Image (tube, coloured by chain):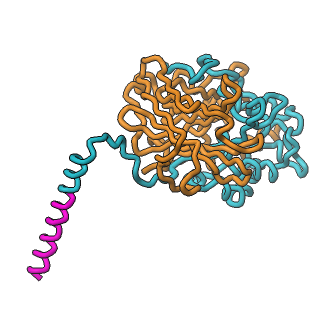
Amino acid sequence: MKKSMKFLAVAALAAVGFGIIAADHIDAPAVQGTTADITDYYAFQGENTSNLVFVANVQGLLSPSATGSASFDENVMVEFNIDNTGDNVEDLVIQAIPRDGKMYFFGPVAPGTPGATSMVQENATNTVSVDITPYGSNAITASNNGMMAFAGPRDDPFFFDFGKFTDILAGNATGFDANGTDTFAGSNVMSVVIEVPKSSLGGSGTLNTWVEAKKK
Amino acid sequence: MKKLIRNILGLALLATMGLTSCDKDDNMMNPVDNGPDFSGTYMTADQMGRPAINTVFVPSGMKDNFNVTPPSQMGAMYASAFADGLRALSPAYANPGDANALGLDADTFGSVLATDILTVSTTGTTTFYDGTNVLTGRNLADDVITVELLLIFGGEDFSENPGLTDDNVNANDKAFDTSFPYLASPW
């Protein structure tokens, strides 16, 4: 018991240094609270099992009253990165960038240059664009070239008793509650969802993937 | 000097006129709508592979830099900090030889986590962890926090520190859709 208390104290100290927040919500000072703050990233097999789905959420912790006025930033591109050769360098990207009420998707396409600096790959053959779904409307989706696209506000799919976790790390609790409280219940995010044929992603069974928010 | 300034002004004027006439020509000769302007250079501001990695493991002074480091360089830069973080955070890594249920000790697990990418299967089940498959993707409904708590605090067989290995929030506050776009409508 003594030992575990000591470790909790150490954990509490560590937490202060680490500034634990959530999935990726407000994870670092430079992006916290900005339109480029990624909250979560998902990649999973689609309802059509020949497809993979990529989801990026930005601008987390939107209350319902704040969601109607939230919008995607035209200076922020969401870029899904796909490494299909196992070296953790992207071989393909899917770029999503808003213009005038629509979200435009480019790719899967080879990046001009891999890494932190990108141009929009306007010459990609795989493209789809979709009207950004307004708050309060049914989801608007679009498809092209075997791809499906969505962009707009959604319920934050992340769930975690983050409040209790901070209590534990602060030394104010020794463990989680038997019935936890979802700190993210009732809050929204701005979502970008793209579904593409697996055959367009290459590789031999496993892909390394990550998402970036890139600012102009 | 005066003349030089006048010449510069003259050149500037010419340039302006030139630009104006170019625009005019464009409008007259290209009635086609060129579509939105996507030009420019975009620089990484935030990035993410697995959930909660930057928030949990990266020391506070390094979080911004972690967000702009290409994944291929993350391992070399952050593996030892992540291992130290695991040892500081969890009694499950306190003793030499301690490992998690994947058989990874603090150094090895720290090294795996430091390269913040999400591996995704293109041939089968996609899940963060379902009891059988490990890190073959991430579904909306996956209880990723409990999985991470188990791997951080649960020790070799998930039995250690039972009060810390499950937040007992096991599902989202809204049901997901089985069809595109899968996420639930906003509150």
Q: Position of residue A41 (x, y in %)?
A: 61, 36
* Left or right of residue A71: residue A39: right
Q: Position of residue B46 (x, y in %)?
A: 54, 47
Residue nearest the observer in this picture, B148 or A167: B148
Q: Position of residue B121 (x, y in %)?
A: 75, 37
- Color of chain A here? orange
Q: Position of residue B122 (x, y in %)?
A: 73, 36
Residue A100 seen anywhere in this rendered image of the structure: yes
- Inspect the magenta stretch and tell me whether residue B13 lies in it: yes
Q: Residue furthest bottom?
A: B1
Q: Residue at x 63, y 31 (%)?
A: A53
* Left or right of residue A85: residue A110: left
Read off the magenta span.
B1-19
Dominant secondary structure (helix, strand or loop) of the stretch shown in magenta: helix
Residue nearest the observer in this picture, B26 or B116: B26
Position of the N terminus of chain B, as image quadrant, is bottom left
Q: Residue at x 40, y 51 (%)?
A: B39
- Inspect the magenta stretch and tell me whether residue A3 lies in it: no
- Color of chain B here? cyan
Residue nearest the observer in this picture, B159 or B73: B73
Residue nearest the observer in this picture, B34 or A53: B34
Residue A14 seen anywhere in this rendered image of the structure: no
* Left or right of residue B11: residue B52: right
Q: Is residue B27 above or below residue B81?
A: above
